[in-house]
Image (cartoon, rainbow, N blue to C red):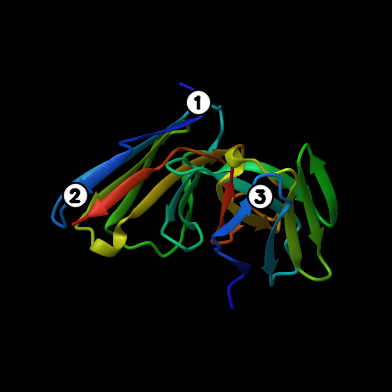
Amino acid sequence: ETGVTQTPRHLVMGMTNKKSLKCEQHLGHNAMYWYKQSAKKPLELMFVYSLEERVENNSVPSRFSPECPNSSHLFLHLHTLQPEDSALYLCASSQDREGYNEQFFGPGTRLTVL
Amino acid sequence: QKEVEQDPGPLSVPEGAIVSLNCTYSNSAFQYFMWYRQYSRKGPELLMYTYSSGNKEDGRFTAQVDKSSKYISLFIRDSQPSDSATYLCAMSAGDSSYKLIFGSGTRLLVRP
């Protein structure tokens, strides 16, 4: 595996379900991100982990719960979601250092909440 | 007012045309400007990156930044059907590596 991988690629869940999204990066980076991408809207940064510590949480509802057990893995735990949470969830990674760093994205998980 | 404005399109052009994609922004602190390309059912991938004002060329692609007008452009020469994708502009002040502000993306269709 190379780059940033995400599983599952597609997920359909009911509002009462609990599920988890998984992201793995094979680039040796020390920062990982969760983004939400909805149709015709800019990417919304949800969470950032740098050196396995959460450094950003952009007012995301508590029904989304991130977990970063190590610098290569990132999870997004989902529970009691709403239909408006249906979107493409993208994981990204970068090497966190001063100045600009390129963010590498995974293919995303297409989430549908019924 | 959004920090970054981008026309969602879709923009439809014939093969071989010159394509111009644009973004405007409001935050004068932005110093790093990027263009990402996103194919259907894929994640965004970095296409071009420019620091501060000026032009940068890479093959058929040219990125321009005009900080005085708060306006950035991506030009695609001799467009190909394989260029059909959504193009996202993104920018950063550079004070924190993860603070990328994205435009909503312009969907481009290059007709054979």
Q: How many labels does the image show?
A: 3
Give the quarter of the figure containing the N terminus of chain A.
top left
Q: Residue at x 27, y 58 (%)?
A: A63
The disc, 2 or 1, on the residue closer to the chain's N-terminal end is 2
Q: Could you say whether the residue bearing mark 2 is in a helix, strand or loop?
A: strand
**Label 3: few (<14), some (14–19) or many (≥20) C-alpha neighbours in 10 Å:** many
- Give the image location of residue B29, x and y in percent: 74, 65
Q: Residue B35, which numbered label?
A: 3
Amino acid type at circle 3 is Trp
Question: Which chain is disc 1 placed on?
Answer: A
Give the CA distance from mark 3 to mark 2: 33 Å
Q: Mark 1 points at which residue?
A: A26
| Element at label 3 | strand
Point out which mark residue A102 bears: none
Quick one: B40 or B64, which is closer to the camera?
Answer: B40
Crowding around mark 2 (Cα neighbors within 10 Å: few <14, some 14 to 19, many 20+) is: some
Residue at the outermost right position: B54
Please say whether residue B100 is visible from this viewpoint. Answer: no
| Chain of the residue under the numbered disc 3 shown in the image | B
- State the image coordinates of residue A53 (x, y, percent, origin top left): 47, 44
Q: Which amino acid does label 1 sit on?
A: His
The residue drawn where x is 54% and y is 60% is B10
- Let me know if marks 2 and 1 both belong to one chain: yes
The amino acid sitting under disc 2 is Met
In this rendering, the label closer to the viewer, 3 or 2:
3
Label 2 vs label 1: CA separation?
28 Å
On residue A13, the disc is: 2
Q: Is the Cβ of the residue at disc 3 closer than 8 Å to that at disc 2?
A: no
Quadrant occupied by the C terminus of chain A = bottom left
Is A18 displayed left or right of A31 in the figure? left
Q: Distance between the residues labelled 3 and 1?
A: 23 Å
